[in-house]
Image (spheres, rainbow, N blue to C red):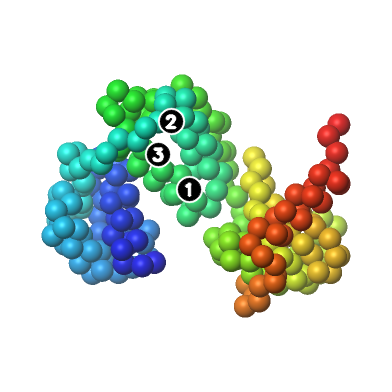
Amino acid sequence: MRRADRLFQIIQILRRTTRPVTAAALAEELEVSKRTVYRDVSDLVGQRVPIEGSAGFGYVLASEYDMPPLMLTPDEIEAVALGAQWVAGHSEKVLSNAARDVVAKIAAVVPENLRPYIIEPSVGVKPATEESEESIDTTSLRSAIRNGLKLRLRYRSEAGNETDRTVWPVILGYAETSRLLVAWCELRRSFRHFRTERIIEFEVLDETNGLQHGELRRRWQRWRAENVRNP
């Protein structure tokens, strides 16, 4: 993570709560040392970001810290809040935290009369009842998708058969109780859906799919239109 991104992320973490956040908690989420956190917080204070607190006690972002309001309607705010609730409850840690950050950013910048739509929305999702038992890093999967990189994965079928595949990842799909990696499979010469809990291990290859940006997704969309029929 770039230093500028890390400084901005510290502000986002502090925005999530009115309670003090310890340097240890910041260091754990940012995956840096507490010494780095102390230095970063000191730099932010030097840039006149109103952070209160100290080492050993924790840090709080002063309530007067503000930014220009977003031009959002109540319906737009609740739509974002609803989506963020689902992502926070059904995704891995990185996306869950990102969803909470989105809500915190909006709550911090919308006018006072719109904040109830964030704090007490009229819509909600059913809380997730259990953690997904997966051993793979879906953050790396998403990065490979963005960069058009191939994956080598070992996959276990429903029947328990294991195969080695080289695939071109298209999208990581989230359902209520599972995740699916949609990819072009070099072995089957077609698009396939891989349940992530059946991926035993994978490696991001230093090799692109050789297509222009967006072309693989367009091909998948055409394939889906031809092969997935509505009842």
Viewer-nearest residue: 155 or 216 = 216
Q: Which residue is mark 2?
A: 77
Q: CA distance from mark 3 to mark 1?
A: 11 Å
Q: Which residue is mark 3?
A: 103
Look at the image and tell me whether residue 28 can be seen: no
> Which structural element holds mark 3?
helix
Residue 88 percent coordinates (x, y): 49, 43
Q: Nearer the viewer, mark 2 or mark 3?
A: 2
User: Contact, CB < 8 Å: mark 1 with mark 2?
Assistant: no
Alpha-carbon neighbours of circle 2 within 10 Å: few (<14), some, or many (≥20)? many
Which quadrant is the N terminus positioned in?
bottom left
Categorize mark 3 by other alpha carbons within 10 Å: few (<14), some (14-19), many (20+): many
Outermost residue, front side: 212
Residue 124 in picture, x, y percent from top left = 51, 28
Residue denoted by label 1:
96
Which residue is at a point 21% across and 46% down the rendered structure image? Answer: 61
Q: Can you say whether 29 is above or below 224 in the image?
A: below
Mark 1 lies on a secondary structure that is helix
Q: Earlier in the sequence, mark 3 or mark 1?
A: 1
Q: Give, as a three-letter code, the residue at label 2.
A: Ile
Upstream in sequence: badge 1 or badge 2? 2
